[in-house]
Image (tube, helix red, strand yellow):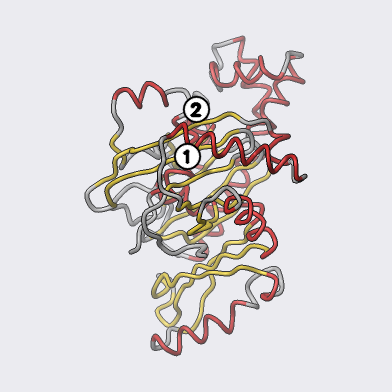
Amino acid sequence: MSLIHGVGDFFAIDIGTNSLRLVQLSGDSQHGWSLQNFAYVPVSEKTIEDNSALGRRKLGEIILGAVQQAGIKTKNVAVGMPAHKTYTTVMEVPNLPEKELKKSIVYQLDQNIPMPIDDAKVDYMLLGVSPSDATKAEVLISSTAATYAEDRMELLESLGLNVVAQEPEPLAMARALTPLGVTEPRMIIDLGEKTADVVVTYGGFPRLVRTIPGGFSTLVKTVSTTLSVREDQARQFILKFGLAQDQLDGQVFKSLDPVLESFAAELRKSIKFFQNKYANTPISGILLSGFGGSIPFLPEYIEAKTEVAASQGSPWQSVRVSSQQQQTLASVANEFSVVIGLAERSND
């Protein structure tokens, strides 16, 4: 089982907070991808989080139903692992010959993960010479509790599926959203239901990975409380009017401004941290996805607060999608960043 490296023929599944997303692609990164099979299935948060035997059986039935709905035949699957269940960072080691370098990496893994290595599933990928210090090499490491990884694998294998890879969701998200051929630093933000995953890429690789607590549900609860409306109505207000100050007398914007100011402050901290480490390499742009790509005027707000150009990113940038598929996906397309990133894995 791999947390980072490539796999063969497979489909991808993203088990989200309140939905399942499945994608199978054909093609490759060089010539472009085509959407072969997909499914989007709403699931209650209670069902997703129910670890009882009955709950796991119910979730398993929903997963098998989604596989059948998508028309997927392969049993090989790559699955995303939530950021709050994984630890991903970039460590530096002396830039040594390859054989010695691998020994150095393995030796230092235990010192760079927040749990005993015997209790963890750990994977790493050599990024190359550090852009800030030629005497060092940078290594991307990712770990998760072995019990969690094995539990997720057992659930899927009990359905007759073969888990060929588990990958932290922020890494998959960054793969889907990073513009092709772009090597300068970019910050990529996926605003989910409960958290926001933030990845800064540089030279085509993640260099900073973090998760900010408080996702779209926090915005919904804030508007619901401030405007005294139901949460489903607050959700509609945010997605329809966003941060427009000429709609609803600007009430949605006024409600969200304090929360979003705190969020922007966290982004500024990440930008400062990155730029302190990589001198003279300013972040050239911010890409928003998930709910971040669906809230009107949020990119403009983030740009004003961070002084970095911000825009909506598209996880479909390298994927050919038929007109019929586009119609089916229209209302949820921004939510596919993680699962598309998983499906775009290769053996490179």
Residue that mark 2 sits on: 294
State the residue position of label 1.
22
- Against 223, residue 345 (above or below) is below
Q: CA distance from mark 1 to mark 2?
A: 20 Å
Q: Position of residue 327 (x, y in %)?
A: 37, 21
In the picture, measured across the screen, residue 331 lies left or right of residue 320, that is right
Residue at the image point whose x is 43% and y is 56% from the top: 201
In the displayed structure, 337 sits above or below 233; it is below
User: What is the number of the mark on residue 263?
Assistant: none
Q: Amino acid at mark 2?
A: Ser
> Residue 301 at what x, y percent from top left?
52, 31
Residue 318 x %, y %: 30, 42
In terms of image quadrants, where is residue 319?
A: top left
- Residue placed most toward the observer, 164 or 35: 164
Q: Residues within 10 Å of mark 2 (few under 14, many from 20)?
A: many
- The reply to whether residue 303 is in sight is no
The residue positioned 47% from the left and 44% from the top of the image is 339
Which residue is painted at 29% across and 52% down in the image? Answer: 29
Q: Earlier in the sequence, mark 1 or mark 2?
A: 1
Q: Report which quarter residue 54 is drawn in.
A: top right
- For this orientation, the residue located farthest to the left is 31
Q: Amino acid at mark 1?
A: Leu
Local SS, label 1: strand
Res 7 visible: yes
